[in-house]
Image: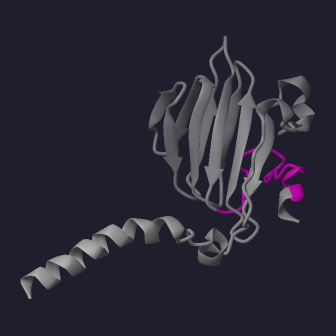
Amino acid sequence: MKTFRHTILLIAIAVSPAVAQTTSPPHHAAHHGSSAHAAYQKFQDLKWEKLIPEEGAGSPEITFLHVDPKSGATQLIIRTPKNYHVPRHWHTANETHTVISGAFIMEDDGGKREELGPGSFNYMPARMVHQAWTKPDQGALVFITVDGPWDLNLMDGPTKKLPPTNYEEFTR
């Protein structure tokens, strides 16, 4: 009987790698309800738009990389010129920043201020008011994710909400 159990165990061990190799992975969309295609974009092909057009050449620029059609979760990049102040604002969704190049100095309304260099990361909970700066001699390139639709709600000034026009291309 002991030999029979060992034989069955050895067969199960021998067969399981073959089964694992022939079993296809679960379909991502079936589990998450999101689009079922991969997305690839080369940096040189990105479409940039002025974030605040009335600032002209001094405006940060934004490009949207991907927007999930169901949840609105968004990945984007913002390039901010040198010596720029991003005014106090908040977003409806949780937001993360990963600095690709340059330095990005961030401050939340609690007064915590941190200088983030290339590869640095931060997380801002939904609706947390924050602001940022670039250094006088260098701008910053920042990869941003939000776990819902992207918006920019300014605390001060004439424009209270700024969804750039090319965001609409991804949400149709």
Q: Is residue 137 left or right of residue 117?
A: right
Farthest residue to the left: give it.
2
Residue range highlighted in magenta: 148-169
Looking at the image, which is closer to me, 55 or 116? 116
Residue 161 location (% of width, % of height): 79, 54
Kindly identify the residue that appears in the image at 52 percent across and 71 percent down.
23
Q: Taking the image as drawn, is residue 81 in sight? A: yes
Residue 145 location (% of width, % of height): 63, 50
Instruction: Please tell me whether residue 92 is drawn above or below residue 75 in the rendered image.
Output: below
Kindly identify the residue that appears in the image at 66 percent across and 72 percent down.
29
Residue 3 location (% of width, % of height): 11, 80
User: Does the segment drawn in magenta span residue 154?
Assistant: yes
From the image, which quarter does the N terminus lie in? Answer: bottom left
Instruction: Please tell me whether residue 123 is drawn above or below residue 17 in the rendered image.
Output: above
Kindly identify the residue that appears in the image at 89 percent across and 24 percent down.
57
Q: What is the chief secondary structure element of the magenta stretch?
A: loop
Looking at the image, which is closer to me, 51 or 19? 19
From the image, which quarter does the C terminus lie in? Answer: bottom right
Residue 103 location (% of width, % of height): 58, 23
